[in-house]
Amino acid sequence: MVRLFERLQQLPPEQRMRALETDDRFRRLPPEQQERLRERLHWFNSLPPEQQRLMVERMERLEEMTPEQRQQLRRRARMFAELTPEQREEARRIFYGWRQLPPDRRALIRERAQRLRTAPPEERRRLLQDPEFLGALTEEERDLLRGVIRLAPLLRQMQEPAETPPL
């Protein structure tokens, strides 16, 4: 289906539904799957062109994943959907901030997070106020570290090795 959406993306929006309806693979699908694809195409057509391109790229990456990776991604998506809107926003902010950091800064925050993770609660509170412990971090990195600690129980279950904050 990714190839179909890639092909449809190249057409003007008003021609996409007709192209979908005449596609042989689409016509062989059960009626309920056809309806889901029509709904998806309608939604896809409502997106700006840049978002459409990004969506096709995401579909391509999804298609390249192993079944286990896809299952893990679905599990994470379900968990993310269960977060409150505030928790989702904070998680997005943390993941975005993490991806923006160069590797050496990630390593520094990873080391600090590991130390906080293994510290008893009272020691953790003290470290989060300690200028020496936090001194090597910028204010943005400190905020990121605090966010990681706040959301750690929720985010730990969603963690991907290199792309996510250390939880």
Image (tube, grey):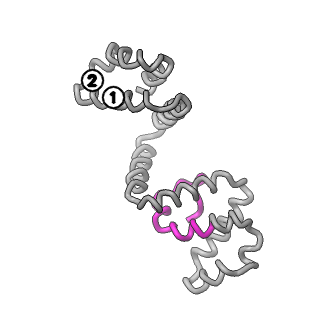
Provide the secondary structure element on which disc 1 rests. helix
Residue at image point 49% right, 63% down: 156
Label 2: which residue? 29
Q: Residue furthest bottom?
A: 122
Residue at image point 47% right, 61% down: 86
Mark 1: which amino acid? Leu
Left or right: residue 81 compared with residue 103: left
The x, y position of residue 61, in whole percent, is 51, 36
Which of 86 and 114 lies nearest the eye of the viewer? 86
User: Mark number for residue 124?
Assistant: none
- Could you tell me if the residues under marks 2 and 1 are in contact, i.e. CB atoms within 8 Å? yes
Mark 2: which amino acid? Leu
Residue stretch in magenta: 145-167
Q: Quadrant of residue 14?
A: top left
Residue 96, above or below 19: below
Foreground label between 2 and 1: 1
The x, y position of residue 96, in whole percent, is 60, 52
Left or right: residue 132 compared with residue 154: right
Which of 84 and 24 lies nearest the eye of the viewer? 84
Provide the secondary structure element on which disc 2 rests. loop
